[in-house]
Image (tube, grey):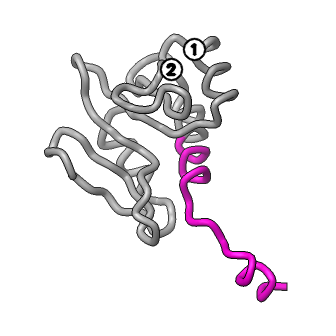
Amino acid sequence: MDKQDLIDHCLTYPGVYEDYPFDESWTVMRHGSNKKSFAFIYIREGRHCANLKCDPMRAAMLRDLHGDIKPGYHMNKEHWNTVILDGDLDQEDIFDLVRHSFELTRPKISKKRQQADF
């Protein structure tokens, strides 16, 4: 998988847009409503990478299990992982990590709105 493949996948999520706040080499995938980032996609040392938010306990476990998952580059190491996209991880595993990051950063539903839905 390369950088563009992951950008294309992220754009399939509802309300998502791509942003380039630093320069063209870093693509940031954001939620449209709250502007929170859930994926930072870039090339570093010739490798296609993505920083993805992750539950801290899951993040530590994944790092222990997979050599292509490392503490987040330039990010909070407890809550973010760097995933090597062009390594040994299966595409479905990468997509699962993207979904997890998307869910962790998605806008919260207010209690008032939750009650109105019932």
Q: In this view, does 92 lie to the left or right of 51?
A: right
Mark 1, residue position? 66
Q: Quadrant of residue 48?
A: top left
Q: Is residue 45 left or right of residue 101?
A: left
Label 1 sits on what residue type? His
Q: What element carries label 1?
A: loop
Q: Do the residues labelled 1 and 2 touch (CB within 8 Å)?
A: yes
Q: Main secondary structure of the magenta part?
A: helix
The range drawn in magenta is 98-118
Q: Quadrant of residue 49?
A: top left
Between 96 and 26, the residue placed more toward the observer is 26
Image position of 63 with respect to 18: above or below: above
Q: What element carries label 2?
A: strand
Q: In this view, does 59 lie to the left or right of 19?
A: right
User: Residue 41 placed where, x, y %?
Assistant: 33, 39
Between 29 and 2, the residue placed more toward the observer is 29
User: Residue 108 placed where, x, y %?
Assistant: 62, 66
Mark 2, residue position? 69
Q: Is residue 65 magenta?
A: no
Q: Is residue 114 magenta?
A: yes
